[in-house]
Amino acid sequence: METERLIMRRWRESDREPFAALNADPRVMEHFPAPMTRAESDALVDRIEQRFDEHGYGLWALEVRETGEFIGFAGLALQTFEAPFTPAVEVGWRLARSAWGHGYATEAGRRALAHGFGEAGLEEIVSITAVLNVRSQAVMRRLGMTRDPADDFDHIMIPEGHPLRPHVLYRISAAGVVRPTP
């Protein structure tokens, strides 16, 4: 899949090293419990690829069209952890710091939503993040997603008392998405 500035594609072996560097960056991972080791990062790539095979969608590797640079991922992921809104398909992203502030997460998120509501035939897509992650919440709003504070929750996979445990939930329905032109 492509956007104006990005190529959204399946993962390559050559993506693993820059993805591991991104996942080891404390600033990139500040809204996750901890940075990832190389082994954890590689295992995540393996799970992402497996989910493409299972669901027909996933977290696409992002490449800047003009330069070919790998900058992270964006796409759709089935969430099944215990929460009032699961199972649900989530739109998400993770970008290298060098890619922040260029609108790439919003651009790729729009394309992922269009795929979800088009080819994948989904009726609703959610997005979640820690309450403290205001940058991702801004992307969710730019994607046209809305938040009802009554849907906010404590993420069960983060220990009680941890500052990242409180999470927000944003939603968008198939009727609410603005579809980009192909």
Image (spheres, helix red, strand yellow):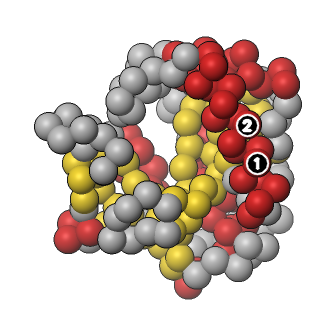
Label 1 crowd (10 A; few <14 / some 14-19 / many >=20):
few
* Residue 70 appears in view: yes
Q: Which residue is mark 1?
A: 50
In the rendering, at what x and y percent does residue 146 appear? 37, 68
Q: Which residue is mark 2?
A: 46
Name the side, left or right, on which 15 lies relative to 108.
right
Q: Amino acid at mark 2?
A: Asp
Q: Considering depth in this image, is 129 or 34 the residue closer to the camera?
A: 34
Q: Residue at x 58, y 60 (%)?
A: 78
* Residue 98 appears in view: no
Q: Amino acid at mark 1?
A: Gln
Whether 98 is drawn above or below 111: the answer is: above
Residue reaching furthest to the left: 161
Q: Secondary structure at mark 1?
A: helix
In the rendering, at what x and y percent does residue 69 appear? 77, 24
Q: Residue at x 42, y 17 (%)?
A: 26
Q: Secondary structure at mark 2?
A: helix
Question: Gap in Å between the C-alphas at discs 2 and 1?
Answer: 6 Å
Name the side, left or right, on which 172 lies relative to 72.
left
In the rendering, at what x and y percent does residue 130 appear? 31, 44
Q: Residue at x 77, y 33 (%)?
A: 63
Whether 104 is drawn above or below 95: the answer is: below
Whether 62 is drawn above or below 146: the answer is: above
